[in-house]
Image (cartoon, helix red, strand yellow):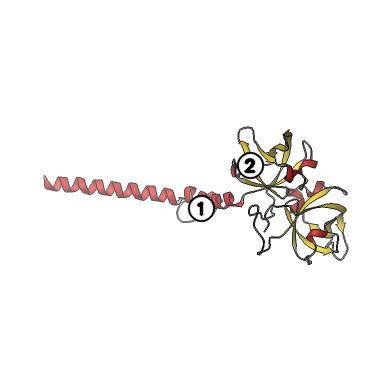
Amino acid sequence: MFTGIVEHMGVVIEIHQLDNSDTGGGGWSMKVAEAEPILVDCRCGDSISVNGTCLTVTDFDKTWFKVGLAPETLRRTNLGDLKIGMKVNLERALAANVRFGGHFVQGHIDTTAIIKSMTPEKNSLWIKLSPSDPSYLRYIIPKGYICLDGTSLTICEVNDKEKWFTVMLVAYTQSHVIMPTKKVDDKVNIEVDMLGKYVEKIVEPMIFGNNYYGEQNDDQGEGYIEKLIKKYLDDKVIKILDEKLKSEQIR
């Protein structure tokens, strides 16, 4: 678990698409240097967020650490586009004794977004982005949370029809994250606020029934709300019939 408050910017110094070393695991690996501030309490197996992606440390020294990148990670994120010399946002996993400054971030990237424009306004910077998978726009709301390349930011505008949203970076944020070094058409990692996904997972079957997720049951796919409405109508019909029967008996 992370907060989206970037602690430090490191630099990629090695990328191996097939790392057969003892700490490489026979897959894609990456080494990040200039990372001293976040390695003072590091251990192998620890989680570090790299551009918002939760990765496991497989090796480290005083100034660098190494992580492995799974195929799913490479498909979902922009980490496969990194080159040696590029900077990355870094954050250690949340400790229980620190002040919580951002929002709950899992480090599980949902999709990427393409930067459509970067527009300065005084000392701040407007950034407009378009998600690679527009279906995630339903979780993006004005003044809500979003995590971009590991940075917790507030959403400013959302245009569902044109499929874009905006954020604004203040001067301090611009000097402490990698976003201002990017350019139009670059990819950015997105993790939407997990709260919206949990609410959707709970509410949709209530409305549409368990079969909404392809499950089979004895309720013919009826949702909880649909059952309530049917019960109300059934009770209403029974009441009307009872009243009609009593009226006929009186006559």
Task: State if disc 2 and disc 1 touch (CB < 8 Å).
Answer: no
Q: Is residue 35 above or below residue 87?
A: below
Q: Secondary structure at mark 1?
A: helix
Q: Is residue 138 left or right of residue 13?
A: left
Q: Residue at x 65, y 40 (%)?
A: 134
Q: Residue at x 73, y 39 (%)?
A: 114
41 vs 159, nearest the viewer:
41
Three-letter residue code for mark 1: Asn
Mark carried by residue 155: 2
List x then y, in percent, for residue 172.
Answer: 73, 45
List x then y, in percent, for residue 98.
Answer: 67, 61
Three-letter residue code for mark 2: Ile
Q: Is residue 60 above or below residue 206?
A: below
81 vs 100, nearest the viewer:
100
Q: Residues within 10 Å of mark 2 (few under 14, many from 20)?
A: some
Q: Is residue 240 left or right of residue 206?
A: left
Of labels 1 and 2, earlier in sequence is 2
Q: CA distance from mark 1 to mark 2?
A: 32 Å
List x then y, in percent, for residue 72.
Answer: 74, 53
| Location of mark 1 (residue) | 210
